[in-house]
Image: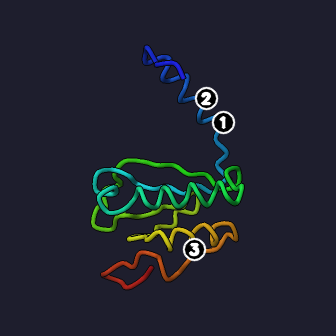
Amino acid sequence: MERLKSINEFERLQERLVIDRNPNVPTIVIPAGTCGQASGANDLIRVIKRELLNRKWVDKIHLRITGCNGFCQMEPSVLIEPQRTFYPKVSPKDMIRIVDALAKDQVLEDLLYVDPRTGSP
């Protein structure tokens, strides 16, 4: 890819990416800011890439790696879009379970974040 030279080129790229994106394809979002990486996000990224490639699911489930999501104490974490399912403190073994569940359009209740005030997931 050629280097972007202006804000106009950036805006055209952004528009093209939005048009090309299918909002109905589930996306696994892994925050990989400093806190995420220090907590093991890179291990999760390796696992998910391997699983999607081995299963030939790169068109069925997408992966997006972002910066910090601001919930550092829960890293490494995973957000599933468009369902907006949040899994905190994910291990590499959990990542495989998350991929399996997502392929079946299921939520892993035992991995969900639990609100400390209400006790609700």
Q: The C terminus is located in which quarter? A: bottom left
Pointer 1 and pointer 3: residues touching (CB < 8 Å)?
no
Q: Position of residue 55 (x, y in %)?
A: 70, 60
Task: Check residue 97 in the rendering and tell me which mark sits there, or answer none.
Answer: 3
Give the camera-side residue of 107 and 46: 46
Task: Check residue 85 in the rendering and tell me which mark sits there, or answer none.
Answer: none
Q: Position of residue 117 (x, y in %)?
A: 30, 81
* Whether residue 29 is situated above or below residue 94 in the rendered picture: above
Give the camera-side residue of 56 and 102: 56
* Number of numbered discs visible in the structure rendering: 3
Label 2, on which residue?
16
Q: The N terminus is located in which quarter? A: top right
Pointer 2 and pointer 1: residues touching (CB < 8 Å)?
yes
The Cα atoms of the two marked residues, 1 and 3, are separated by: 28 Å
Displayed quadrant of residue 13 = top right
Label 1, on which residue?
20
> Is 94 on the left or on the right of 41, as rendered?
right
Amino acid under disc 1: Asp
Q: Position of residue 88 (x, y in %)?
A: 40, 70
Element on which disc 2 rests: helix
Residue at 65%, 34% in the rendered image: 19
Residue at 63%, 67% in the rendered image: 102
* Whether residue 30 is situated above or below residue 97 in the rendered picture: above
Amino acid under disc 2: Arg
Amino acid under disc 3: Arg
